[in-house]
């Protein structure tokens, strides 16, 4: 099956369709995305708490590094569940077994702003497995890894493409999963997507690495 990619513009439009005639709420989509990421990270070797794209980085043992502007309702829910927050990422990563990189989504563009350059540098330098959601942080959705800056040379071990792969997968060389079983046949047809079949109750499908093939 040919793996077709979804531009950032179309990804944003598809999300709107999911929340309009698809009848999903944003909270539902975030929870389903978190479930997909959790399952993919488990398949990659480390079971994780379900995460959401609004999070920054979370280790499997449930320590969360979140941007100061992160959503207050989500922060309250996590604190109520006993998930500790940290503001020293360099220290936290030394105790982790696996890191989920969810700093930016498919809408990212421009320069990496504080406090994230140091976090991305740590992700690049760590020997831990890193699972990125939709896009390795600092990568261009259309043009892949940056030529300079904190993300230059950052290549996570695993990528979870939510809904459908984005053009940057042409440069990704690790394990690649697609998550997003909530895309209806009508929406897939509208965006000319050829999505893989999900087995059983799985929320993700591992697909062939296509680096250099598109």
Image (tube, rainbow, N blue to C red):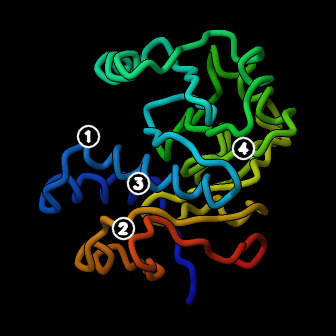
* Residue tagged 2: 181
* Residue tagged 1: 27
| Disc 3 + disc 2, Cβ < 8 Å | no
* Residue tagged 3: 9
| Disc 1 + disc 4, Cβ < 8 Å | no
Foreground mark, 1 or 3, reads: 1
Sequence-wise, which precedes: disc 1 or disc 3? 3
Q: Position of residue 86 (x, y in %)?
A: 60, 12
Q: Position of residue 146 (x, y in %)?
A: 76, 42
* Front one among 36 and 15: 36
Sequence-wise, which precedes: disc 3 or disc 4? 3
- In the displayed structure, 167 sits above or below 29; it is below
CA–CA distance in space, label 1 to label 4: 25 Å
Label of residue 191 in the image:
none
Q: Residue at x 59, y 63 (%)?
A: 167
Q: Secondary structure at mark 1?
A: helix
* Front one among 142 and 164: 164
| Disc 2 + disc 4, Cβ < 8 Å | no
Q: Quadrant of the N terminus?
A: bottom right
* Residue tagged 4: 130
Sequence-wise, which precedes: disc 3 or disc 2? 3
Q: Secondary structure at mark 4?
A: strand
- In the displayed structure, 213 sits above or below 27; it is below
Q: Residue at x 55, y 61 (%)?
A: 166
């Amino acid at each position: 099956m040919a793996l077709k990619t979804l531009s950032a513009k179309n990804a944003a439009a598809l999300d709107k369709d999911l929340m309009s005639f698809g009848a999903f709420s944003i909270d539902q989509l975030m929870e389903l995305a978190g479930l997909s990421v959790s399952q993919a990270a488990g398949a990659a070797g480390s079971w994780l708490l379900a995460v959401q794209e609004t999070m920054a980085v979370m280790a499997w043992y449930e320590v969360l590094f979140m941007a100061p502007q992160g959503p207050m309702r989500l922060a309250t829910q996590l604190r109520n569940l006993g998930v500790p927050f940290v503001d020293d990422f360099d220290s936290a990563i030394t105790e982790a077994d696996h890191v989920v990189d969810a700093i930016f989504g498919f809408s990212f563009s421009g320069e990496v702003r504080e406090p994230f350059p140091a976090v991305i540098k740590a992700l690049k330098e760590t020997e831990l497995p890193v699972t990125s959601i939709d896009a390795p942080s600092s990568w261009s959705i259309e043009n892949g890894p940056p030529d300079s800056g904190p993300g230059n040379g950052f290549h996570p071990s695993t990528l979870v493409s939510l809904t459908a792969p984005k053009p940057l997968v042409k440069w990704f060389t690790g394990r690649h999963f697609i998550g997003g079983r909530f895309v209806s046949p009508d929406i897939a047809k509208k965006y000319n997507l050829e999505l893989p079949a999900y087995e059983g109750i799985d929320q993700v499908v591992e697909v062939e690495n296509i680096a250099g093939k598109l």
